Structure formats: C-alpha cells, structure tokens
Image: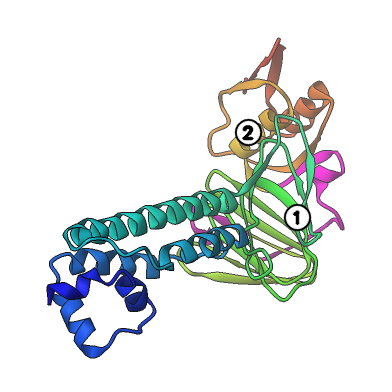
Amino acid sequence: MEDIYQDDTLLARWLCGDLSEAEQEALERHPDFPTLRRIVELSDQLELPDPAVQAMWDRLSPQLMAPKPVVPKQDTRRIWLSWAVAAAAVLVLVFFTWTLLQSTRSTPEMAATAIGEQKTVTLPDGSTVRLNAVSSLEIFTNNWASTRKVHLIGEAFFKVEKGMAPFLVETSAGSVSVLGTSFTVMQRGGAFEVACYTGLVQASIPNGEQQALREGQKAVARNGQWQPVGALTDSWPSWMQGESRFANAPVYEVLAELQRQYHVKINATGTGGRRFSGAFVHGDLPLALRMVCDPLDLKYEIQGNTVRIWKE
C-alpha cells in the first residue's frame, strides 16, 4: 500500500477525480489525507468573482497540477507534505487577495455636508441626491445593478432614475423604497419624514408599519409612530429654495435646524413643549431668528457664535 505514494501524479489525478477505486481507498487511509481533504474543502468555499483573481488562479493551478520528477522512495513523505504546504499557501494567497478585493469593493462611497452647506451627488445609475446641511450619505455601489441602496443620515432630496431594481433609502428611523420618482427623506432625532413629489413611494418604520405615498403627499413618523398623511404645499423642497419650513413642529427641532443652517450654538429657555408653524430664511441670521421668535413671543440675543433665546 505504501508504494502508491511513490506516484507523483496521484494528488493531481485525485483532484481531477481520475483515481481508481483501489487508489482512492488507499489514499483515504493515508494519515495525512484528512488535512489535505480539509484544504480542498476550504478551497471549494471560496468564490473568485474578480477576473484578476481568477486569472491568478488560472496561472497557478497548472503549476500545482503538473507532474513532478520521480524521486527516491525515501523522500515520498516529504513530497506529500510539500504538496499540502504548496496547496495551502496558494489557497491562503487566493483567499487573502479575494478578501482584500471584496473589502475594497464593498466599502460604500461617502458624501457629507457641513453646517449651512448643500451638495448634489450623482449615483451610478444617473440618479441624483441633493443633501441638506449636516447630512451624510453612504452609497453601496457593489452590485448596484441589482441592489440600488443608500444609507442616509440627515435630509436629502432624491431624483431617482427608473430601473429594474428597486431603489432603497435606509435610515435609523425608517426606510423608503421606490422604482423611479422624486422625493425627500428626513431623519433627525426621533423624526422621520418622507415627501413624494412625483411618482409613488413606499415608506416603512422599524415596527413594520408601512405608508404608501403618491405625488403631493407627505408622512411623518415621530418616536416610531406614523402621523396622519398630509399634503405638500410646495412643488419643491423649501430648503432647496433658501428657507426651512415647519408645520406644527416641536420648537427644539426648529432650533436644531437653525444650528445646522447657521454656525451658532443656541441656548434656549422657556421653549419646552411648544410648537411652531412657519419658516426661517437661510443666509440672514437676525432675520431667521425674528421669523422664529416673534410668533412665539420669544426674545433673542446674538453674542458672537452663541444665540440666547428666552421667554420674558
């Protein structure tokens, strides 16, 4: 039985499935066979989707499968171990390269805006995203043709090109799925708002409740609960027109948006539990403060980059 291991083509023929039944039985009784079988099992679990990795494997595999010169009987054990070590080394190299390429490919692209900044991002399919101030977008470009997915923190206007694959916007407070339309998504604190400007959108929140919106409708979820569907009053998001508008919003959300549009820190007292309907402009801090504070009978004072707001 030991004579069978003097055949240097044995492993190559085993990998190709060309062993006779007797040779297969003898090979499986060899003490090193479990180790070699495990190496092959691990190689079967690898996927090599990248042409560069596949090309590398195509170059290396003939070297592994090529017959080796006959050597004296006393060195057959060393040859066996050399085969195993070489196979393991190649598999480790392929796995490392594949993992590195997959890691690089699957890392999402990022876009973000600073205080008072807006930015337009073009996606791989030609869709566009306009980010409002202090917002960020992760774009998962891997397998974009079959899975168009982005992750949003903040607020953005989406103009999605029609495609076979659904377009998915994920946030920590909910998600939106469409095929092709224009809409806004806002996730700030405990608020999640979706507004449909054209087409249809399907929005959902973590508890599984869904909201279907058609053109001209908007829906807001606060603290994980949908509010009644409302109607849009503008044909374009207000923040893309140079102002921020609110409908019965908590004052703390209004003040937080002021801080995003202006590089200031707001210290407010006497605003707890109050709500605001109205707007403030971008680009003129004193006017914006008057637009918010006057209807609420609040006073304000600007001290450098700090704004103090209070109720007398």
From mark 2 to mark 1, how far is it between C-alphas? 29 Å
Instruction: Please tell me whether mark 2 or mark 1 is closer to you in this view.
Output: 1
Q: Name the one closer to the observer, 184 or 60.
A: 60
Q: Amino acid at mark 2?
A: Ala
Specify which label sits upstream in the sequence, 2 or 1. Answer: 1
The percent position of residue 93, horizontal first and vertical second, equals: 43, 51
Q: Name the one closer to the observer, 56 or 188.
A: 56
**Residue at 35%, 83% in the rendered image:** 17
The percent position of residue 310, horizontal first and vertical second, equals: 62, 21
**Residue at 72%, 28% in the rendered image:** 293
Q: Dividing the picture into quarters, in which one does residue 273 lie? A: top right
- Which quarter shows the N terminus? bottom left
Residue found at the far bottom of this picture: 21
Q: Is residue 246 left or right of residue 58?
A: right
- Which quarter shows the C terminus? top right
Q: Is residue 24 left or right of residue 276?
A: left
Residue found at the far top of this picture: 303
What residue would you read off at disc 2? 256
Q: Is residue 73 above or below residue 255?
A: below
Q: Amino acid at mark 1?
A: Leu
What residue would you read off at disc 1? 123
Q: Residues within 10 Å of mark 2 (few under 14, many from 20)?
A: some
**Numbered range of the magenta stretch:** 220-246
The percent position of residue 28, horizontal first and vertical second, equals: 18, 76
Q: Is residue 220 above or below residue 118?
A: below
Q: Residues within 10 Å of mark 1 (few under 14, many from 20)?
A: some
